[in-house]
Image (spheres, grey):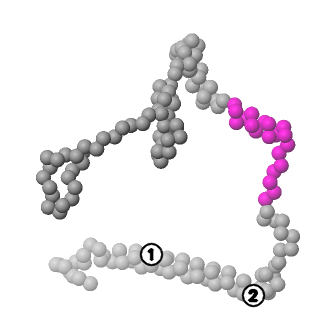
């Protein structure tokens, strides 16, 4: 223990704090002993049981299995219709749009063409392997341009291609 001027102890080594630490250590040790004793008692309970009581064969085998619920036609139809119903949030949004734009405005907005879908339909499909089966609508002509103004590299590689 370090002693400072005038026989005073440092702030972290006051007698009160050491008593608190002793109490905390004692509480910790007591709880550790209690948990160890509880684990030991559980172990002794299992060790004292006979093998017949511990190892029981399940002969029926139906306890853990879940049986699939068989739906009737009417229940299947109800389930299908429930999926097709519009949700309350969608209905709320539709009512709000009708209130803001009117019925004619909403119908016009619904009939308005979607430009993204039109562009995607016009683009056609890209033929990755260039099979030429008519799937690609446009064929591009490519032209190789060699820039001869670039000086030859020291390693002898080809000139830059643009």
Q: Is residue 41 left or right of residue 105?
A: right
- The quarter of the rendered structure image containing the N terminus is bottom left
Q: Residue at x 82, y 78 (%)?
A: 57
Q: Position of residue 50 (x, y in %)?
A: 79, 87
Residue 130 seen by the camera: yes
Depth check: 102 or 156 in front?
156
Q: Position of residue 138 (x, y in %)?
A: 44, 34
The residue carrying mark 1 is 24
Q: Residue at x 69, y 31 (%)?
A: 85
The residue carrying mark 2 is 48
Q: Residue at x 45, y 78 (%)?
A: 25
Does 30 appear above or below 83? below
Q: Is residue 52 left or right of residue 130?
A: right
Task: Bin the neighbour count of mark 1 within 10 Å (Cα to Cα): few under 14, some 14-19, many 20 and up.
Answer: few
Q: Position of residue 109 (x, y in %)?
A: 53, 18
Magenta portion: prevailing SS class: helix
Q: Which residues are magenta?
A: 66-85
């Amino acid at each position: 223990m370090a002693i400072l001027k005038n026989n005073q102890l440092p702030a972290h080594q006051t007698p009160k704090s050491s008593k608190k630490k002793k109490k905390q250590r004692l509480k910790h040790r007591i709880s550790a002993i209690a948990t160890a004793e509880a684990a030991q008692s559980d172990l002794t309970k299992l060790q004292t049981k006979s093998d017949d009581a511990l190892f029981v064969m399940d002969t029926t085998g139906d306890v853990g299995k879940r049986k699939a619920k068989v739906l009737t036609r009417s229940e299947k139809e109800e389930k299908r219709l429930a999926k097709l119903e519009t949700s309350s949030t969608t209905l709320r949004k539709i009512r709000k749009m009708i209130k803001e734009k009117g019925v004619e405005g909403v119908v016009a907005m619904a009939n308005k063409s979607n430009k993204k879908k039109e562009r995607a339909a016009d683009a056609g499909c890209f033929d990755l392997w260039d099979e030429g089966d008519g799937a690609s609508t446009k064929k591009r002509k490519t032209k190789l341009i060699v820039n001869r103004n670039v000086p030859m590299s020291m390693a002898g590689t080809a000139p830059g291609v643009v």
